[in-house]
């Protein structure tokens, strides 16, 4: 049972920053996903991959994984790249 720990980023579809700084522990799927023959939806038998735990800090997420013997790897947070420009730049 392996998991990955990452920091949630800002939602690109909204301007708000709610839940931006949360750390997430998400279990990786070990069983392949398969298409349902009747509906065509993809699904699997691994219910552990549906579990997503959120924490306030990386140390709390790491402590939880260590306490319960969960192997994990850290996905480093992506740096935000701000492109500062003004409306006048459109006419240069």
Image (cartoon, helix red, strand yellow):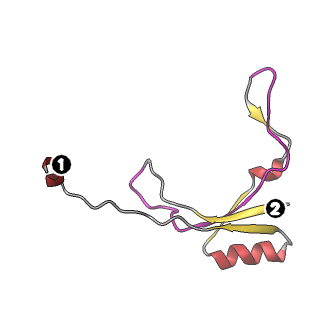
Tell me which corner region of the image, top left, top right, bottom left or bottom right, holds residue 81: bottom left
* Percent of width and height locating residue 10: 48, 58
* Percent of width and height locating residue 22: 57, 67
Label 2: element kind: strand
* Percent of width and height locating residue 32: 82, 41
Residue 48, above or below 43: below
Query: Is residue 6 shown in magenta?
Result: no
Residue 86, above or below 68: above
Residue at the spot 78% in from the left edge and 36% down from the top edge: 43
Q: Dot 1: within a 10 Å radius of its alpha carbon, few (fewer than 14), some, or many (20 or more) residues?
A: few
Question: Would you name the residue on which mark 2 appears?
Answer: 2
Q: Is residue 36 left or right of residue 6?
A: right
Chain part drawn in magenta? 14-39
Magenta stretch prevailing secondary structure:
loop
Residue at the spot 60% in from the left edge and 68% down from the top edge: 76
The quarter of the picture where the N terminus appears is bottom right
Q: Is residue 75 left or right of residue 50?
A: left
Query: Is residue 25 shown in magenta?
Result: yes
Residue at the spot 73% in from the left edge and 67% down from the top edge: 73
Q: Dot 2: within a 10 Å radius of its alpha carbon, few (fewer than 14), some, or many (20 or more) residues?
A: some
Q: Is residue 12 left or right of residue 58?
A: left
Question: Would you name the residue on which mark 1 appears?
Answer: 90
């Amino acid at each position: 049972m392996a998991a990955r720990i990452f920091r949630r980023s800002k939602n690109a579809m909204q301007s708000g920053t709610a839940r931006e700084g949360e750390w997430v522990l998400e279990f990786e799927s070990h069983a392949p996903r398969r298409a349902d023959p009747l509906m065509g939806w993809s699904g699997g038998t691994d219910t552990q991959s549906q579990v997503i735990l959120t924490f306030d800090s990386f140390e709390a997420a790491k402590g939880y994984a260590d306490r319960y013997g969960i192997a994990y790897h850290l996905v480093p947070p992506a740096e935000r790249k701000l492109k500062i420009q003004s409306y006048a730049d459109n006419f240069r």
